[in-house]
Amino acid sequence: MLAVNRRTLMMGAAAVTAYATVRSDYVFAQAMEGPFKQVPLPYASDKNEPHIDKMTMEIHHGRHHVAFINNLNNAAKDNADLFKKPIHELLANLSSAPENLRGVLRNSGGGHANHTMFWQVMGGAGGAPTGAIAAAINDGFGDFGKLQETFNARGTAVFGSGWAFVVSDKAGKLSLVTTPNQDNPLMNGQMPIFGNDVWEHAYYLKYQNRRADYMKSWWNVVNWDVINQRYADAKAGKFTV
Ligand code: MN
């Protein structure tokens, strides 16, 4: 019993040390040099507290997302011409990429695009949608409450790792999709206006296995101003990621 207690204490100490390390060395944009860059978080890493904790944000932005960028930049060393293209063009034309590069484009390219979107659409105050997206949500889903209910249910039902997205077509018609792994809707000709990461790394520290609670809470941090801008870009043919 004593041994178990001591071990538990030691594990606790290790966790605290790990957290201290993350806090002290957390610097934005630590990705390796190359054509793909990470945009710094547009807000402090504790901005989404208490719904998404600071430590999760820092590990997620500073390690998980950076790993995708590093994979892309490594692949770009030997394929400079192809990787000069912006990520949204690469994802939209995945099937025309050389077969040996489709894996890194799908997984790390999709991961880079998904997370670039994800940081942008958070940091807000949640609440009811505003502007053009509010009307489009009513048109597409009935009302905001119905969208939330369906979005949360679909995201919770993703088996393993993936994403839930509200996507737009070129005419501005919204629909709801989920994708496995790091697949991005641009691979299917759809523009992800906003979406939620349902990989365990996005919520496990605070919510453990309670993905449904995380998804419900996430709506409190969405930024409707940014989402409206993304929706306007989609309709104007200016959408990137
Ligand atoms: Mn993630």
Image (tube, rainbow, N blue to C red):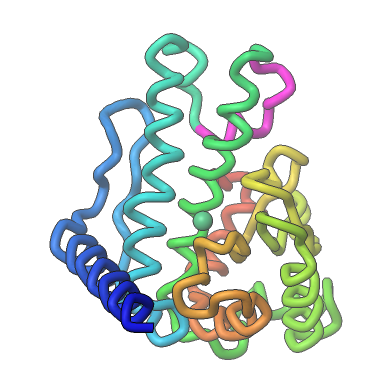
Picture layout, residue 184 above or below residue 231 = above
Q: Is residue 171 above or below residue 121?
A: above
- Horizontal side of residue 57 vs 180, given as left or right: left
Q: Is residue 226 magenta?
A: no
Give how far across and how far down residue 169 sits, in percent. Answer: 77, 52
Split into 4 quadrants, where in the image is the N terminus?
bottom left
Q: Is residue 91 magenta?
A: yes
Q: Which is more toward the observer, 70 or 34?
A: 70
Q: Residue at x 28, y 32 (%)?
A: 32
Residue at 32% x, 82% y is 2
The secondary structure that most of the magenta stretch takes on is: helix
User: How many numbered dots are placed on residues in this image?
Assistant: 0
Please tell me which residue lies in front, 122 or 78. Answer: 78
The part of the image, by quadrant, that contains residue 235 is bottom right
Residue 194 visible in the picture: no
Q: Which span is picked out in magenta?
A: 87-97
- The image shows residue 11 at horizontal and vertical percentages of 31, 70
Identity of the residue drawn at 32% across and 53% down: 62
Pinpoint residue 161: horizontal percent, then vertical percent: 66, 55
- Of all residues, the one furthest to the left in this rendering is 24
Instruction: Tell me which corner region of the image, top left, top right, bottom left or bottom right, holds residue 230.
Output: bottom right
- Which residue is rendered at x = 59% and y = 18% of the image? 101
Q: Is residue 225 above or below residue 166?
A: below
Q: Of residues 2 and 127, which is closer to you in this image? A: 2
> Residue 158 placed where, x, y %?
76, 62
Residue 96 is drawn in which quadrant? top right
